[in-house]
Image (cartoon, grey):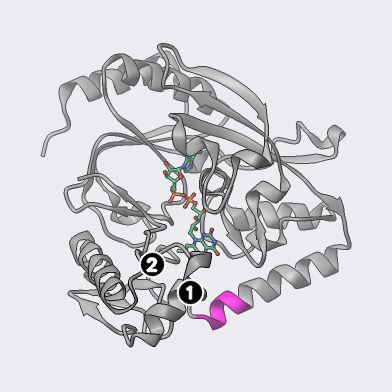
Amino acid sequence: MKCPENIIRIVESCTKEHPGDIEVRYNEPMTTHSSFRTGGPADCWIRPSGENFPAFAAALLAAAHAGHIPVFVLGGGSNILVADAGIRGIVLDSGGWTGETGGKRQEGLLEFRAGTSLDAAAEIAAETGLSGLEFLAGIPGSIGGAVWMNARCYGQEIADVLAETESIVFSGSAPECTRQSADKAEFSYKRSPFQSRDALILSASFHLRPGEAPQIRALMDSHRRDREAKGQYRYPSAGSVFKNNPDFGKPTGQIIDELGLCGLRTGGAQVAPWHGNFIINTGGACAADIRALIDEVAARVKTAVGFDLEPEILFVGH
Ligand SMILES: Cc1cc2nc3c(=O)[nH]c(=O)nc-3n(C[C@H](O)[C@H](O)[C@H](O)COP(=O)(O)OP(=O)(O)OC[C@H]3O[C@@H](n4cnc5c(N)ncnc54)[C@H](O)[C@@H]3O)c2cc1C
C-alpha cells in the first residue's frame, strides 16, 4: 500500500520547516511499536527526538488538522491492539522525547518529558531521593501514556501524585500549548481528562516526598520481582485486557480463571494459562486472533455470570 501523497507532502514540509533528528517511515509495520507485537502498517510513523520535539509536533499537528489527516499519538504501545489493516494517517511516536526536564525542581516537583519510560522515571526519582513513583517500576509504558490512562497498581494511581501537565491541544483551529494543574476530581479508574480531548501530552510533573534511596529502590525491586513472578514479561501482551469493576465482587482475572478460561486459544492468541486477565501472543498471533479471543472471553463471562466486561486495552486502527 502506498502512503497517500497529502501525508507525504505535509511531513516533508514540516521536516523542512523544523529540521532536526526526525525519523520518518512510510507504511511502517506497527508490530515493532506495540507490546502485543501485532498490527498492520501505519501510513506514516514519525519519531522526532531532542529539543525540536515540541515545535515540530505543533507544526505537524497544525498541518494534519488543516489537511483532515488523523494523528495517533503513540507512547510505549503497551496498552493498544493495532488492527491488522494498520493505521490510516500519521502515528506520532513520543518515544524520542525523554528525560527529566529539571524545570520544576525549585518547586519541589520532578517533571518528565512524555516519552520517558515509567521505569526510567521511577529510577530518576529514586536517584534523587524522592519517594512516590515506586509503583510505576516495571510497567512497560511511558509517562504520557500513563497520564492518559491514569495508570494504576499496588494501590496507587497517577492522579495521586500528578501535579501539572503541559500539552498541545489540537482539536481547535490552531494547536495551543497549555500548562494545567492536575485536578484529581477529573481523574478516575483508568480515566483522565485527556481521553475527551485531542491533546499531545508534552510533560508531566509530580509531587513527591523525600525518602531514603535504598528503601525506595527496595520497593521498586519488589514490584519488579512480583511482576516477573506473575509471568507478566513471559510473552508479548498489553497487560490486563479487561477493567476491574467493584460490582463484580472480585477481580476480573479471577472470574475468568474460575470459569476455566485460562489457556483458551484463538490462533496464536491465548488467555495466559496462569492469569485470566492476560491475553498473550504465543507467536504469530494476528490482531484479529486477539480481538476474537477478547470477544469470546467477554461472551462466555456474560453467559455464565451476566457481567459485561469492559476492555481496558485500546483498539487502534481498522
Ligand atoms: C506486562 C504489562 C504490565 C502492565 N501493567 C500495568 C499496570 O499494572 N497498571 C496499568 O495501569 N497498566 C499496566 N499496563 C498497561 C500499560 O503499560 C499502561 O497503561 C501504560 O500506562 C500505557 O502507556 P503507553 O505509553 O504504553 O501508552 P500507549 O499504549 O502507547 O497509548 C495508550 C493511550 O495513551 C495515549 N498516549 C500515549 N502517549 C501520549 C501522549 N504523550 N500524549 C497524549 N496521549 C498519549 C495514546 O494515544 C493511547 O490512546 C501493563 C502493560 C503490560 C504490557
What SS does tag 1 mark? Answer: loop
87 within the magenta span: no
Residue 232's disc number: 1
Residue in view at x 38 percent, y 67 percent: 237
Would you say the beta carbon of the disc 2 residue lies within 8 angstroms of ligand 1? yes
Mark carried by residue 71: none
Q: Quadrant of the C terminus?
A: top left
Where is mark 2, residue-wise?
A: 237
Q: Are marks 2 and 1 in contact (CB under 8 Å)?
A: yes
Q: Which residues are magenta?
A: 226-230
Counting residues from the start of the chain, the first of labels 2 and 1 encountered is 1
Queried on whether the Cβ of the residue with tag 1 lies below 8 angstroms from ligand 1, the answer reads: yes
Q: Residues within 10 Å of mark 1 (few under 14, many from 20)?
A: many
Q: Residue at x 80, y 65 (%)?
A: 216
Q: Is residue 112 visible?
A: no
Would residue 54 be found to the left or right of residue 243 on screen? right
Q: Position of residue 123 (x, y in %)?
A: 71, 57
The answer to which quarter of the image holds residue 114 is top right
Q: Residue 231: x, y in percent?
A: 48, 80
